[in-house]
Amino acid sequence: MKETVPINAFDRCGELLTFAAERYGMAETTTPDSMATEIPDRLIIGPKDGVVYPLTVSYCGNCSMPLEYCEYYPDYEKCKQWLEKNLPDEFERMKLGSTGTGTSSAAAGTGTGNASTEAADADDEKKRQKRGGKGMMKTKKAKEEGPKKICLSRSARGRKKSVTVVTGLATFDIDLKLAAKFFGTKFACGSSVTGEDEIVIQGDVKDDLFDVIPEKWPEIDEDFIDDLGDKKR
């Protein structure tokens, strides 16, 4: 009985490659070592030569982003004002960088005149506005300052019930949700925000509000509160 010797798969592959090289005149066989490729530098993990660690990143106090992203913020002018006041060295560096770009552009396009420069600035502004898409932060619009006045009225709810309507608290920069919660706790009733600057309190508490509101918010004098009487909703 013959003894069977197990065949190593790798040895078998090597024999086949050697046979193919001899049979078809290949110069040399391909081995796993020859197929290895060098790893690009950008994929190498770990410290890199010429880089000082730990890295220091400066952030803008206006847009809260790294300084190199300030130019893509909608309110770039305020970013520059903040940089000039708090980081003058970085401001000068960014200013020199933008001036150098403008100088090289002018040298390349001699004779195009001021019209081409203005067109290029307009194109840069459009790119800055479009870049970022929906994720771009929008500047908050300043509130239109109007007359500060709180109006109280009573409205019928059914045949025997009534509600008290409070408007104008937002003109004093008061959080309507917190105010509605306070009224509900104070009068032990339902209270909710029903409009942009309107709170509805279940029950007739209009007369009590003339004392409660100035007591809760001292900046609101009783003279700023008007009684509109009974009104239909």
Image: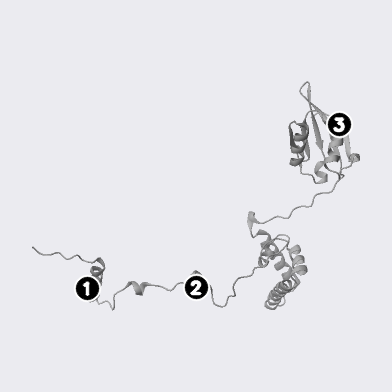
Residue 23 lies left or right of residue 142; in this view the side is left
Q: Residue at 74% across / 41% down in the picture?
A: 177
* Residue 178 horizontal/vertical position (percent): 75, 41
Q: Secondary structure at mark 3?
A: helix
- Give the mark toward the camera: 2 or 1: 2
Q: Give the labeled residue for mark 2.
A: 41
Q: Are marks 2 and 3 in contact (CB under 8 Å)?
A: no
* Residue 157 horizontal/vertical position (percent): 77, 25
* Residue 96 horizontal/vertical position (percent): 72, 75
Quarter of the figure with residue 115: bottom right
Crowding around mark 3 (Cα neighbors within 10 Å: few <14, some 14 to 19, many 20+) is few
Q: Residue at 87% across / 32% down in the picture?
A: 228
Q: Nearer the viewer, residue 15 or 170?
A: 170
Identify the amino acid type marked 3.
Asp
Q: Residue furthest left?
A: 1
Give me the disc on residue 207.
Answer: 3
* Residue 158 horizontal/vertical position (percent): 76, 23
Q: Residue furthest right?
A: 223
- Give the mark toward the camera: 3 or 1: 3
Above-or-below relation of 159 to 164: above
Q: Residue at 80% across / 31% down in the picture?
A: 164
How far apart are labels 2 and 3 at the CA level?
Answer: 76 Å
Label 2 or label 3, whichever comes before in sequence order = 2
Colour theme: one colour
How far apart are labels 2 and 1 at the CA level?
Answer: 39 Å
Identify the amino acid type marked 1.
Phe
Q: Give the labeled residue for mark 1.
A: 19
